[in-house]
Image: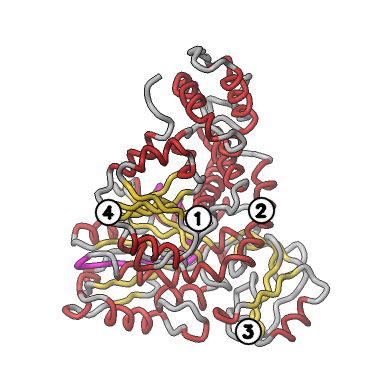
Amino acid sequence: MDGKWYQVLLDKVKRSYHDLILVLDYDRLGQTPELRAALADTFSLYDYRGELPLRRFLKEKSGGRALIFKPPEQSYLPYDIEASADVISWQLREVFPKMSLSALKTVPAENYQRIFDAYLKMESSLNMVDAGGTRQLLNKWLAAPAGTGASYGKADAGGPIHSCKDRGDEIEYRCWVLSQQIEELLTHIPVDWRALAPLWGELQYWLCQEKIDMAEPSDLDRRISRQFTDYLLASYPGLFYESYYQRPATVDKVLPFLANRPASKTALLCMDGMSFQEWFCLKQYLAGHGLEKFNEMAVFTLLPTITGVSRRALFCARGKLKELVEEEKGFLQFARQNWPQAVSRRPGMFINIDGWWHKEYLDFNCLGLVYNLMDDLAHSMINVRESKELMQKNLTLQLDKTELGEMLRRLLEEGYRVYLASDHGSVWCRGNGYQAVKWLVEEKAKRALLFPNRLLAADFAAGKDLLAYENTNLLGDKVAVFPAGREMFGKKGETAISHGGIHLEEVIVPFVEVQ
């Protein structure tokens, strides 16, 4: 069969006309000899391992075009080099979109072409194939003599290829697919949490929306909580040094990112308390108002994930607790210093907007807005039963009573680049029997305590299943104390929807351009 397994990856490179291309090589596909050979005639190839060798390579290369492979374990790249390059990503999922990556990665790369030839013959008859089904297919394909042209029909996939109760139920099948994709990402080292968070949010949305009963989410939730906590302890501080040229990694880099986007008018709307589950509610609402095109990204909030910290970081463009000021002061200061369009027409900020269109928004080229709808709903929920189902229903009803869709549409028509952000997410949680004490940063922060020093934090956390978190760059001398999993500081048996802690749903939130 004609066609190379890596053609889809080559096509992404061919669409670029830059002399310097940076490939985020998540699955190390750039190490395969046949793919490197296909690129060698056009590019000088370099495998990134550190800043100084890279600069030496760029200095010594004699003209022509260069392609840099950045493997997944390398998080830092010099800002000036990244800014001058065309950044693209390669993933094995692009080559075999319906198969399990964990199973594929057990096969040597020299077999990819045989697998690809067989895969193309039956791709149209495949649904998403889990790890077990993928291994069955790989065994069949690789057992056949090379070049025999063996054909495999749908029955050859080794029986059912997913465990959904009713294949005719598209939503239930979608939930199964999402859970499989999440399982797959959890096997990666390191886990791409910014890719996983939207999948988890969508899964929670559909489970609440359609009242689907699946056993997997509770197991996944525990795995996610455990692995994500380990990730934060090891890697969270390094996020603040990532370049924001292509996308912001943390909320304090959102405004610097926007300052590098060409626009005569910019509007940033913070949906206070919006996690990815709520974003999918909002996304459905906006689709009903003719807004269906979005550039969706994910960013990390500041710890602790409470309004008094993370929302101020968003609008101050600062990542240190001691440097945070009130949102309006920080936003206006940043806009005047970094947005040229703010000189001709002063920047403006509106906090606690009502979700309706107001013509005075047009008086400002740099517009900051804060809408508390989602955070207010979260804190008002009672009788929470291990999900955000009731909150989601209320949010859907409340959005329909607003003019938010019309407001965003008007801003777009008036020439604004419109962005939606969040300062933190929220989780359903249950009391752990430990009462919050006087050192709380925010009165309603049942998911985080902030102590003035290590001794007080250690004294409170002693003998309890709590995490005392120190980060002098972020918190200074203060020490945050977080409960485990979905617990909160409160009476045993008490339930609520709150925020402040380190669950994935609180820490990684949507950042979206509405187009």
| Dot label at residue 310 | none
Nearer the camera: disc 4 or disc 3: 4
Earlier residue among tags 3 and 2: 2
Q: Where is mark 2, residue-wise?
A: 386
Front one among 179 and 98 = 98
Seen from the viewer's position, the closer of residues 426 and 250 is 250
Name which of mark 4 and mark 1 comes first in the sequence.
4
Disc nearer the start of the sequence (4/3): 4
Lower sequence index among marks 2 and 4: 4
Q: Label 2 vs label 4: CA separation?
A: 52 Å
Task: Classify 512 as above or below 104.
Answer: below
The residue at which mark 4 appears reads as 19
257 on left or right of 180: left
Q: Which residue is mark 3?
A: 478
Find the magenta span and give its range.
263-284
Q: Secondary structure at mark 1?
A: helix
* Residue, disc 1: 194
Which marked residue is nearer to the observer: mark 4 or mark 1? 4
Q: Amino acid at mark 2?
A: Glu
Residue 269 can be seen in this image? yes
Q: Residue at x 26, y 61 (%)?
A: 417
Which of labels 3 and 2 is toward the front? 3
Residue at horizontal 51 percent and vertical 45 percent from the top: 27
* As drawn, 42 above or below 6: below
Q: Nearer the viewer, mark 2 or mark 4?
A: 4
